[in-house]
Each structure stands twice: as C-alpha cells, then as structure tokens.
C-alpha cells in the first residue's frame, strides 16, 4: 500500500533537523481511530487502514514520503520507529477499543 496516511503542506517549515525531529513531525500526524484486540493480537486502526506490530507505512512530510514502522501497541500507547529512533505516543481515551475472542 503506497498511500500516505498523513500530509504536511509542502510549504510548511521544518524547523530543526535530524531523524528525531523528523520522527516527531511525522508522529504528530498520526491519529489512531480504533484499537482492536483479536485473540490476543493488537491491531491499530489509522483512518481506514489496520496495522499490526511490524507494519511499515509511508507518511508524507515536506513533499517526501518517510517510512514509519509500528513497533509496539499497548492498551494506552503505541510506539513508532523512524531510522532507529523510537517515539511513544498515547492512544487517546476517545479511541474506540474492541476485544474479540
């Protein structure tokens, strides 16, 4: 799937530099809509797509696609990785949660 999940306008200034800064900007664009747990396996829904731990997906920033990896999903947070840098993001209490099986 080559569809970018989020986009930042091409004229948006990217202050700072380095992989950590890029990861922070990319992660800020990700908004999970649901957390599923099916037979013990957690799945994070982002827009209309489902992602399991290990999934890699493109996110657009400054007219470039950057590949993020979903490295962990917990009940209240998830972890993204970009070029060896990790960031932990909270799962909002407004995100729907489902446990199946």
Image (cartoon, rainbow, N blue to C red):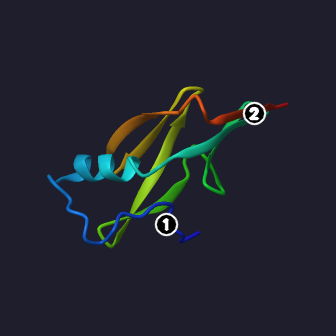
Where residue 98 is drawn, which disc sits there?
A: 2
Where's the N terminus, which quadrant? bottom right
Query: Residue 88: x percent and y percent?
Result: 41, 34
Question: Residue 30 versus residue 65: which sits nearer the camera?
Answer: 30
Query: Residue 66: x percent and y percent?
Result: 37, 63
Q: Image height check: is 93 above or below 71?
A: above
SS of the residue at dot 1?
A: loop
Q: Earlier along the polypeptide chain: callout 2 or callout 1?
A: 1
Q: CA distance from mark 2 to mark 1?
A: 25 Å
> Which residue lies most toward the left here?
16
Q: Residue at x 25, y 64 (%)?
A: 12
> Which residue lies most toward the right here?
101
Q: Is residue 43 visible?
A: no
Where's the C terminus, which quadrant? top right
Q: Residue at x 66, y 57 (%)?
A: 48
SS of the residue at dot 2?
A: strand
Question: Residue 42 versus residue 4: which sits nearer the camera?
Answer: 4
Q: Residue at x 49, y 66 (%)?
A: 4
Label 2–label 1 contact, CB within 8 A:
no
Q: Dot 2: few (<14), some (14–19), or many (≥20) neighbours within 10 Å?
A: few
| Residue bearing mark 1 | 4
């Amino acid at each position: 799937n080559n569809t970018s999940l989020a986009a930042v306008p091409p004229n948006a200034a990217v202050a700072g530099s380095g992989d950590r800064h890029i990861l922070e900007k990319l992660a800020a664009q990700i908004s999970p809509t649901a957390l599923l747990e099916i037979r013990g396996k957690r799945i994070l829904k982002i827009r209309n797509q489902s992602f399991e731990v290990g999934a890699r997906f493109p996110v657009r920033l400054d007219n470039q696609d950057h590949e993020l990896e979903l490295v962990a999903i917990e009940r209240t947070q998830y972890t993204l990785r970009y070029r060896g840098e990790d960031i932990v993001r909270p799962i909002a209490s407004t995100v729907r949660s489902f446990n199946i099986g």
